[in-house]
Image (tube, rainbow, N blue to C red):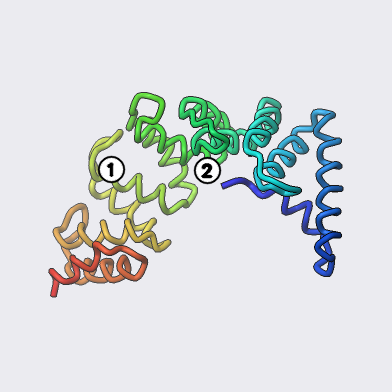
Amino acid sequence: MMHMAVAALTAVVAVGLLAGERVEFKERLMRAAMQKAKMGDPNALFTVGEMHYLGFAGKKDYAKARDYFERAAVKGHTKAMFNLGYLYFSGKGGVRDYRKAQEWFQKAAEQGDPKAMRYLAQIYYKGLGVPQDYARAFRWYKKVADLGYPEAQYMVGQMYRRGLGIQKDPKRAAIYLERSAKQRCARAELELGKMYLVGEGVLKDPKKAERYFKQALQDGSAEAEEYLKRLQ
């Protein structure tokens, strides 16, 4: 889940370098990034954090990655805020702390990071380390959904459909599920199939239902197969 800033540094490595030369080159990059990090440069702090996270010049070290991400994050580095939140969320490095994850995702989300918005929405939706709050979850999911992310569009559709955090509105649910389905989200395709099958928020249309069930099956939904059998 990390942002791959390191890729920009390694892009200049010639394809023909021998293995030993590659190791030496990585070590030089690490030293150069460390030198800038010592001067407090937030981009360098972030890059060193990613290097430790990826095991760029040796063994992965999530604890060191967390330290560098935090030092970059307090200087306002948005991607470092997200990465720090993700480390606390995932528990990598031996420290799982949903409350701290929420705090850093919140900061990154307020800076416009869509992945932070999605994780923040999930935290509120499930009540991880904070009181469950569907209204806040809905607001953040909708921000991400309106940026075009299919999984968030699916969640907004389902929340409109069930009246979670927002007034129940099957028609708007169908709109967001349609947007998600256009990007081949299997869960959205399955739910749209169900809605067209009974006329929930849309005009009843068994043929459309069948089409969505077939798409959902193609995209990995085992449940869609059961609905197709019923239609037959």
Query: Quick one: quadrant of the C terminus?
Result: bottom left
Within-10-Å neighbours for mark 1: few <14, some 14–19, many 20+: many
The kind of residue on which mark 1 rests is Tyr
Apparent side of residue 75 relative to residue 198 in the rendered image (left or right):
right
Residue flagged by tag 2: what amino acid is it?
A: Lys
Q: Earlier in the sequence, mark 1 or mark 2?
A: 2
At 25% from the left edge and 50% from the top edge, which residue is drawn? 171
Residue 115 — which label?
A: 2
Q: Which mark is residue 160?
A: 1
Instruction: Name the residue at 27% across, 60% down.
Output: 190
Residue 218, placed above or below residue 75? below
Residue 191 position, x and y percent, is 26, 56
Quadrant in which residue 77 is drawn: top right
User: Which residue, as the protein is rendered here, is positioned at the far bottom?
Assistant: 232
Task: Give coordinates of residue 95: x percent, y percent.
Answer: 53, 30
Closer to the camera in the image, 58 or 83: 58
**Vertical placement of 109 versus 20: above or below?**
above
